[in-house]
Amino acid sequence: FYLNTYSSEDEIVSHMQGLRQRGGMPLNTGAALDYVLRNHFSRSSGSRKDEGVPQILVLIMAGRSRDYPRHSADALRRAAVTVVVVGTGDTDPAQVKEIASQPSLSHNVEEFRSLPNVQDQLLVSLSTLPVARETTRQQPTVPIRPAGANKRDIVFLIDGSDNVGATNVQFVREFLTSIIENLDIGSDSVQIGLVQYSNYAETEFYLNTYSSEDEIMSHVEGLRLRGGTTLNTGAALDYVLRNHFTKSSGSRKGKGVPQLLILITAGRSRDHIKPSADALKQAAITIFAIRTGNADPEQITEVASDPSLVFSITELPSLPHALERVMTPLASLTVSQVPTESPTVPSKQVLPDEENKRDIVFLIDGSNSIGQTDFSFVRDFLASIIQNLDIGSDGIQVGLVQYGTYAETEFYLNSYLSKAEMLSHIRGLRLKGGTRINTGAALDYVYRYHFINSAGSRKQKGVPQILVILTGGRSNDDIKPPADTMKRAAIMNIAIGVKNADPLQLEGIAVDPSLVFSSKTFSSLPSIEEELTSLLLTLPALRAIPEPTAPTKQVIPEASKRDIMFLIDGSNNVGNTNDQFVRDFLTSIIENLDIGRDGVQVGLVQYSNYAETEFYLNTYSSEDELLSHVKGLRLRGGASLNTGAALKYVLQYHLTPSAGSRKEEGVPQVLVVITAGRSGDDIRRPADALKRANVLPVVITAKNADPLELQEMLIDPGLVFSVQEISSLPDVQEQLMISLSTLAAPTVIHKEPTVITEEHTDKITEVLSSTDSRRDIVFLIDESDFVGNSNLPPVRELLSAIIERLDIGSDRVQVGLVLYGNKAETEFYLNTYSKKDEILSVLRSLSLQGGRTLNTGKALEFVLRYHFTRSTGSRREDGVPQFLVLVTGGRSGDDVKRAADALKQSNVITLTVASGSADPAQLKEIASKPNLSFSVRDFYSLPSLQEQVIGSFERTHALETPTENPALYVEEATIDNTRAMKRDIVFLIDGTSGMGRSFIQVRDFLMKVIQELDVGPDKDQVAVVQYSSHPTFEFGLDRHSTRDAVLNAIRNLRLRKGRVLNTGAALEFVTRNVFIPAAGSRRDAGAAQILVLITAGRSRDNVGRGAEAVRQAGIVPIAIGAKSADTSEMQLIVYEPSLVMKLNDFSDLPTIEKELIIKVNTIVIIEDANTINTEVLPEEVNKRDIVFLVDGSENVGNTNLHLVHDFISNIIESLDIGTDRVRVGMAQFSHNAKAEFYLDTYSTKSDILNHIKGLRLKGGTTLNTGSALDFVLRNLFIKNTGSRKEQGVPQFLVVFAGGRSAEAVKPYAEAVKRDGIAIFAVGVRHADPAQLEEIASDPSLVFSVKEFHNLANVHERVMSPLSTLSAPTVAIRESIIINEETLIPGEERVTSVEVMQKDIVFLIDGTLGMGKAFPLVRQFLIKVLQELDIGPDKDQVAVVQYSSDAQTEFAFNTYTSKADVLAATTQIRRKTGRLLNTGGALEYVARNIFHASAGSRQDTGAKQILVLITAGKSREDVGPAADTIKQAHIVPIAIGAKSIDPSELQQIAYSSDFLIILKTFHSIPTLHQRLISMLKSV
């Protein structure tokens, strides 16, 4: 409060009693003294200094100030303020005396409780102090400039990167403040500007922004450095020259005022600085250069105008000490020392106030034809003109619009009423881009949305309306109608054309030919500035022509008919909370359309995993009907998003004559897609189909949508509109309306189809095809020991050489890859990749599994069944040639003939490529004809076969399809397809890690089975549930009504990867939640209820109760098991043993496909089945394992410990403790965790209570709750320490926290929940409620109290669930929580370990010990990066270099493309340094890089990998830091050479498999594949 806030003692005492300490570090006493002087000892704050009242400041401080308070204390003395200081704690006595007005006014006490001891002395001082006299300001020790040379324009350019850092910003602020205090600030004396920079420069304020010292000081005191790892000093110098030393920014260079630049930098520049520095010097700007930290002395010398103007500071805290050295030349430089230049733009004429009102809108070309370089000239041109205008609501108003394909408002006439705000906007202007220049549409936009009252136009008051259009190219649309409309509306159009602008179009726009200006280049725009400014200030107002203004559809009036389909994302990506924004947006659009059968027709579809019609184009013919439907629109939700399928749906069912489409009448067909997420399926094919059907797509993206993904469907990339949030949709309404009203139907190109007829023979006929180069090619590669990894390079070389020669693409050549030995496994399908680079990348990382058995026959069968099918990309039905290339090195152990014959009968052309021990007779049986069998003596000769193989592809081998059904070796089951029986079939699939890569085989098996079912609303219905510790709904029985929709959903299934298998709970889940009418079950309508269980392991819980529930509900279970599945357990689930199918491995699934279909088709309805109660009844369970995790930090403190004791003891008293009943364990934590006792330590209640009574807090100020959760999971919830988890005993964790965790808690809590442990969270005082909710298994299990003495109030609330909850209930609740938090319950968007997202940090030794090996390391790093799949949703990379300290080169979120990462890596230079602190560097990356703020995606499941490359032994112990890394779930890989300590690297590396030790770094560039393999194996 201020001196004049309160006038009574009671008010002041009342405020004091409510005072709370705000905390914070560090202590800046100097800044605080300055603040008090400026803000409190002033008349407005109640100071009575002018009346002679003594001014006294009492300072109470308890620590050493981090800034320098002496100058501030001196300022208080000069202002006649007496300072009394009371110091305690860690106060520096010297600082206390320095601040106090005199030694007798400084008081020191040892601790705060002794403060009353100085009360009497203090009161005596306050009551007897005389009035201090205000002294005149003493001359500073630094020389002041001569009286005749007091004018200066000084711009400070300061390093704002991480080289300075937030901890050192105070020293930069103090230095700037000290200089400014010693200058005579004012618009007629010294002007100051400030810029900070890192990878780019950013203006803090211009020379003419502030005219008083107080304003500048206020800005500087609030200065925050923006950070950044890269330093581009050259670009920053260039920025200052272009944007600050200009007349519009306040430079007085033209008046002979000295121009000074002071550069402060702490790092080496990554770009070239000499050209920029020379340009500044040539412009008569004197440069001071202050270097500190890692700044390069040579670079600094290049920058400075003279060596005497280079100042070197050892470290940033010493920066203020350089004041006198800098001030001397700064104050003494005179104008004679600085060359001058005449101003480039002469002063402009200014009209008297009464004639100076104008409304001027600038319409500037922002298309790609301008380019970034020329756009800077446009920006300067605008700023220079506005600088000479009298801006204000009673003067000149200015608006600005930028356009390309469409127009976009920068600001309206009434947006800014001050010149400074307007210039600030213009200086930040960015080129919007766009491939087209639609000047006509832009003119119409400006007329409709800018020259109107609501946008600030004063046309009705007679103020002249002026449009200045600046364009660099010819318009793609008609400009005449909108230009004429504007002229009739009395708007004066001035046209400026540059480069490729069309002179005739410019004359058509301008009111008069004399108002057309032309400039050859953008850099010469200043040549027309004076004449244009004169016109803007002198042109009189025009009279409006009394004719109609603009027609309703001005730009293309003849094309008012449109068929517009809206395709709306209705998934959880949008969410129910955003329903209203979508409805409002659609309503606003429809209200602006001319709805009717002869005007605009509108249709609406919403979609998530499938599409659903709201209404067709011909459903409604009036605006009211449409709006009524839209107002009732509800988004249906859904976890996944299949945009491709939705596009196909719209094309097939909406853009057809029967649905109202008028395409055949030439009416434009427009599709508006609004989406908020990334598609889970391929959109390329349906997008191509839309283009072929001449549909014009417009896309609006929000939230997590990928604009690049959706650009594939666009005819014009300028038709993508992006908003951050759904609530921002109105921001793009104007652009969308312009697009909807101006888009014309594309020209339809009719192309006659090419028909190739072939003679049917019993032989293969070769047809040379010049018209169709499409091929589907699957490579089947032997990965057994017959080939081995030693022969992999030539195999890879052959495949790569063939791929390089093929025209890869989804509409050209498609490639698939399968590896086989004992069994076959898919690497990728024909439709997995559509780019050559993607396929080559997979080949580069290919590795072989090995094995002694080779079953080529089974592999051939596998390829035919799972690769040459439509669902996996085969285009066999479209007549595209199908090729199989077998590469093998051994003799098959099974029969190959039957499978080879089946391939031939299926029109698949098989080539064989062999070496080693391959059997020539078998190869001839397999190859489609003898000349398609190739062999070489050794594998290294394989690449020589590429020409022959490619030659075979270039000839289309059209196999005649047999007229009779082939005699396939698979026996056909007799199935009555005419049956009308309805079936509800639920597939319950094991989703644990135990399923592994077999999940793909299960998914393919399901697709084969579904293809045999008669799916439909009144036929078969299908649902899929995946489960581990808890079940997850994939889709319900009534979700998909067609076979294709079901297949599409199954194709998108991804393994959940849980750890624990609770089959019993899953059986209960499907009984109560899937086989019910609400989820689509038709049991009451007589449909058979069938459950197909597919599992890979033994259940952790008891399946008996779940099996009984299934049977009582009349559901017929079929059990399929492989791997570790328990046959007896499966027999317990089913009705009879014949319904159990046990396999050795899931690769054998094809052998039971027909058997399963027969079983499904022969199951009948089980009549008179007893129903069961679907309500979960509470279960009294007296067995449970409970662990207490207690905050042992200072957040609790010893004063509150007894209250914690009582709380836990009361809970223990209420439990039935015993070895066979309730077991209890305990751990406490602060920065780390330790076990107090385990679950099996004590078996009696008294022992546990005795331990708790003797509990002592471990102490510590930091709270790492996440690590503590991980600790108890690994050390207390395990069998060895007493956990009975494997016996099905419920597991509970009670977390007790008194403060906020310093690290993320969510990933660790999720890991505990996934292990089937229910978590309770009890929070007191400073505990973070958001973190508590993340920790707890359910919000109902969060218990918060304000103070420790309130803990007893939640005892009953904790005891109730702790004594009644059972494990299955907890699992179900956990699934609900995951669903709420992630929208896609438990989903992991990966199909295998290889494609999982990775966050990789390279930590590189930058010391002198690395020496000349550093370029080799950089080369190695580049090779590795080239192999990675880098992108926002793929791999992310960061690089950190270290010596005695660590330096971030770039973080995960610095670059999003591989090209940018590679470019940045090539620029890395060794940081140098002699000391090597590897431990400190490891801690640095753990805290600063593997963190969400730096782009880490650990919370979303991305692998966290650290690659350390070092050349020496660390000066400090690496053990603790290595443990920190591993506890944070980061996998470290260590590479060392030269003087390293092998044992030290073994400490760091995750295991010996992740360790590479070299003698020197000379061989490191050749090891990139080895590292890639390690990265993949994590």
Image: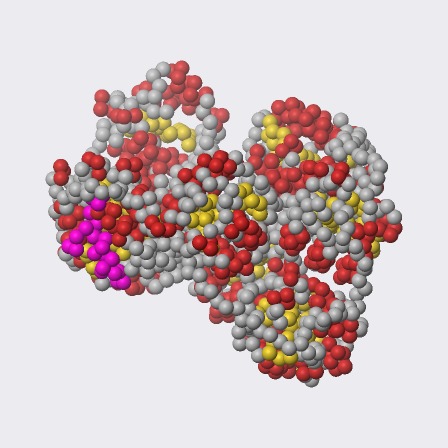
Q: Residue at x 72, y 27 (%)?
A: 1360
- Left or right: residue 25 compared with residue 1312: left
Q: Residue at x 73, y 76 (%)?
A: 926
Q: Quadrant of residue 31?
A: top left
What residue range appears in magenta? 488-514
Q: Residue at x 76, y 37 (%)?
A: 1084
Residue 1332 visible from this viewpoint: yes
**Is residue 889 located in the magenta-colored stretch of the structure?**
no
- Left or right: residue 914 compared with residue 1489: right
Q: Position of residue 658 (x, y in %)?
A: 53, 49
Q: Position of residue 1239 (x, y in %)?
A: 76, 39
**Is residue 508 located in the magenta-colored stretch of the structure?**
yes
- Left or right: residue 272 compared with residue 1086: left
Q: Residue furthest right?
A: 1137
Pick the front one: 1311 or 1486: 1311
Q: Residue at x 57, y 33 (%)?
A: 1329
Q: Quadrant of residue 433?
A: bottom left
Residue 318 visible from this viewpoint: no
Which quadrant holds the C terminus? bottom right
